[in-house]
Each structure stands twice: as C-alpha cells, then as structure tokens.
Image (spheres, rainbow, N blue to C red):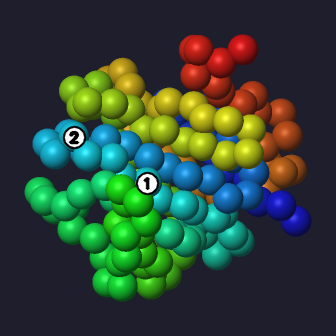
C-alpha cells in the first residue's frame, strides 16, 4: 500500500505527496537553505536524509555529514515521528517547500495556524484535493 502525506490546516485535510517527499525552507536568520527527505510509513514519517548549505544559528550539519557540492548531507538516525508541525507565521523569509514526483508547492507563506503533516493511506485521501502553488498550471 502506498502511503500519502496529508496536510491538516484549520480543520481541513489535503492529500499531497505519495511516497517520498522533500521538505525545504530558508533559515530565517542565516538565510541558508535546508532540505529534508521524508518517507511516510505506517509507523510514521521517516527522515531519510538532511542537507544544509551552511552552518550557524542552530544549523550545524549532523553526525557523519559530508560535502556534496554546496550542501552538507547526512543521514539522521531518528525513529519515525507521527507528524510534523510546521509554523506558519508569515514573518519568515519563505514558506515551506514540499516537493514530490508531482512537483513542488509552497506551504505556510502567509500567517495562519500551524500546518500538520502526517501519513495517510490512499483510502483516507481519495476525495481530498491536492494543493498547488499559485504559479503552477
């Protein structure tokens, strides 16, 4: 069974990424890019890889990090998490970028309640529309 990822915001749920997805953002202080690759599983969301373009202000590369071009890349050793809660203050440099095989969408650019990402199976998400960023067709 393929797991999807559902976004819960304001009491509504939307299905997005099926399978592996990347969550990226720009650090509000350092203005540095950070990306994480996640996989939804029945046990929760599994962080497969993390990458950051620099260090500082709480952005130190993790254990075993190595350079790949402009990125520090490593494989975190963490247990699955049931959900990710993403702040959406509207006061940061950017929103969250969620990318999967279907493309990318920006989340939380405007001030709103926090967004919650959690695994959901296809049956749970069949009738839920998929959000897209305004510049996608």
- Give the vertical position of 71 relative to 80 (above or below): above
Residue 137, position as x, y percentages in the image: 72, 14
- The residue lying at 62 percent from left, 53 percent from top is 21
Q: Nearer the viewer, residue 23 or 115?
A: 23
Camera sees residue 106: yes
What is the count of numbered marks?
Answer: 2
Quadrant of residue 58 within the rendered picture: bottom left
Closest to the observer: 18 or 128?
A: 18
Numbered disc 2: secondary structure: loop
Residue 111 placement, left or right of 56: right
Q: Quadrant of residue 66?
A: bottom left
The quarter in which the N terminus is drawn is bottom right
Residue at the limit of the structure toward the front, as seen here: 69
- Mark 1 residue crowding within 10 angstroms, few (<14) / some (14–19) / many (20+): many
Give the residue at x 36% y 21%. 110
Residue under the image location 44 percent in, 47 percent down = 24
Residue underneath mark 1:
35
Q: Is residue 58 above or below residue 87?
A: below
Where does label 2 land, which residue? 31
The answer, for residue 51, to whether it is visible in the render is: no
Q: Quadrant of residue 118?
A: bottom right
- Residue at image position (49%, 49%) is 23
Q: Secondary structure at mark 1?
A: strand
């Amino acid at each position: 069974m393929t797991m999807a990822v559902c976004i819960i915001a304001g009491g509504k749920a939307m299905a997005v990424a099926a399978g592996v997805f990347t969550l990226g953002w720009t650090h509000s202080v350092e203005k540095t890019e950070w990306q994480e690759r996640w996989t939804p599983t029945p046990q929760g969301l599994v962080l497969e890889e993390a990458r950051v373009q620099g260090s500082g202000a709480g952005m130190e590369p993790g254990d075993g990090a190595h350079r790949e071009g402009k990125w520090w890349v490593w494989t975190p050793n963490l247990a699955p998490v049931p959900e990710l809660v993403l702040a959406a203050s509207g006061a940061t440099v950017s929103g969250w970028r969620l990318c999967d095989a279907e493309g990318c969408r920006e989340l939380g650019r405007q001030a709103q309640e926090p967004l919650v990402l959690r695994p959901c199976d296809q049956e749970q998400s069949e009738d839920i529309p998929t959000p897209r960023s305004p510049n996608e067709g």
